[in-house]
Amino acid sequence: MGPLKPNLLDLLVALFCFVAVFAVMAKVLLPRIGKALVGREYAIAGVSGLAEETQLEAQRVLAVCQAELAAARHEASRIRQAAHEEGAALLAEVRAEGLRAREEMVAASAVRLRADRAVAEAELREDVLGLATELAGRVVGEPLTDAFFAVHGGFRFGWRGSHYPGRPVEELWLAVGRDPDGGWYFDAYFLGRTPLPGGAPVAAAFARWLLAAAPEGRYEEEFLLLDGVPRSGSLLTVEVLLGREEAGGPEYLQVLLSGEAGGHAFEVCAPLECRRVVRAELEAAAQRLLGAAERSADRA
């Protein structure tokens, strides 16, 4: 009959078989396939959610790691800065300690140098004064010992210096004394012997002025030793200055000359200055002068 005109029985058998197969598939296979597809979807959705959770957890862990790394970097920077500051402070302390040690060594050396210089100056001054005294004794024809000065006036103060800046260093001295005949005089290397008006009272006043306690700070005091005393046709005035230029510094002694000659007044503009006064030596000389003046006044 051919494919274009099938047999009715064959169509019925084919239709029954199709229905049977469709029924079996609809009742058995399609539900199983649907369940498999649903399970697959659930599995895919679960894996995707787990992956998202894992990704979120990974991001959280990464954020924590980054925060800890930033904190560690900050702590390392702080430690490095603290170490740098401590090193700088230690270096500054060591440098300051070195400077203090150097200053202490310099100060100690300066003190030792000043002490050695003072000792050397004192020894040299004693030697120079001893030689000057011996030479003066040869000039006057008798030894000029301490007993001589105690009897004849007692005050002689010497030092090394120069007339004016730039001039050679010489032995300078001034003296207030008493002649064997009882007369008092003022003597200096640049003037020569000059009578001292007022005699023993003026000498005693001069000695007490030298013995007066010196102020601690800067000061300058003057004593008028000669006031218009006639000498070689002129009038001579001699002032003695004793002072200190700064607190804690050495004392100095100056002799100022002025007067009148030929009707014209004059004044020595560059005072003869002692750079340093040793207070013990000055007071010893002043004590000798005061004792001689008081003994002279008692005998009078």
Image (tube, rainbow, N blue to C red):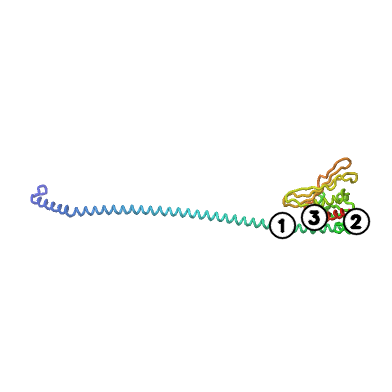
Q: Secondary structure at mark 2?
A: helix
Instruction: Residue type at mark 3: give it.
Output: Glu
Circle 1 residues within 10 Å: few <14, some 14–19, many ≥20:
few
Number of marks = 3
Which of marks 3 and 1 precedes in the sequence? Answer: 1
Return the residue at label 1: 111
Name the residue nearer the viewer: 208 or 117: 208
Return the residue at label 3: 283
Q: CA distance from mark 2 to mark 3?
A: 26 Å
Instruction: Classify residue 28 as left or right of residue 288.
Output: left
Q: CA distance from mark 1 to mark 2?
A: 42 Å
- Camera-near label (2 vs 3) is 3
Instruction: Residue type at mark 2: give it.
Output: Val
The residue lying at 43 percent from left, 53 percent from top is 67
Q: Secondary structure at mark 1?
A: helix
Residue 260 percent location from the top left of the image: 87, 42
Return the residue at label 2: 140
Instruction: Classify residue 164 as left or right of residue 3.
Output: right
Q: Are marks 2 and 3 in contact (CB under 8 Å)?
A: no
